[in-house]
Amino acid sequence: SGCCKPPTSCGYTYMNETYWAPGEGLTGIDTDCLRWSNDQLQLCYGCGSCKAGVLASLKTSWRKVSVINIVILIILVLLYVVAWAAFRHIKSIDNEEAHGETRMEKARPTYLI
């Protein structure tokens, strides 16, 4: 049910947002029923239903965060590859390497007779 309202199996009656009246459903089977309090500082924060609700909300929010992290990782890898290719290209220009020509040419070629 969450942290701010008692578990539905306890049979509490809704009075307003901050107060739930004990009903006839308190059978003692669910330990969360005994932990519920109308005190605004306590409520049901020690209950298993509260912990399950918090865990469910964290699961969805962390799933969104993990998808964002994966997208950012892919973008960073692509930027790294582009930067690496640009660095190699600049390095080849600085070394005055020829582009589109043969690199090895003989100074005095021998001809077969």
Image (cartoon, rainbow, N blue to C red):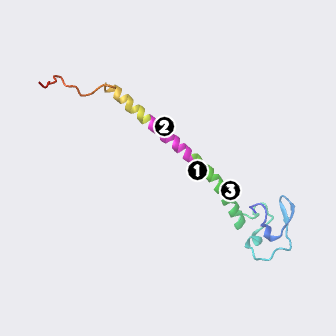
Rendered view: 76 above or below 9: above
- Residue found 50% across the figure and 41% down from its top: 76
Q: For the residue labelled by badge 1, is the local secondary structure a helix, a strand or a loop?
A: helix
Crowd around label 1: few <14 · some 14–19 · many ≥20 (10 Å): few
Instruction: Kindly give the residue lying farthest to the front in the view shown.
Output: 113
In this rendering, would 98 be left or right of 75?
A: left
Is-magenta flag for residue 14?
no
Query: Which of pointers 1 and 3 lies earlier in the amino acid sequence?
Result: 3
The label nearer to you, 3 versus 2, is 2
Nearer-the-camera pick, 74 or 8: 74
Distance from disc 1 to disc 2, alpha carbons, whole Å, reads: 20 Å
Q: Amino acid at mark 1?
A: Ser
Instruction: Kindly give the residue lying farthest to the left in the view shown.
Output: 113
Q: For the residue labelled by badge 2, is the local secondary structure a helix, a strand or a loop?
A: helix
Instruction: Kindly give the residue lying farthest to the top in the view shown.
Output: 108
Q: Amino acid at mark 2?
A: Leu
What residue is disc 3 on? 57
How many dots with numbers?
Answer: 3
In this rendering, would 110 be left or right of 85?
A: left
**Magenta stretch?**
69-82
State whether the magenta stretch is mostly helix, strand or loop: helix
What residue is disc 1 on? 66
Q: Locate residue 50, reporting x and y percent.
A: 71, 63
Q: Locate residue 52, reporting x and y percent.
A: 68, 63
What residue is disc 2 on? 79
Q: State the quadrant of the N terminus.
A: bottom right
Distance from disc 3 to disc 2, alpha carbons, whole Å, reads: 34 Å
Is-magenta flag for residue 70?
yes
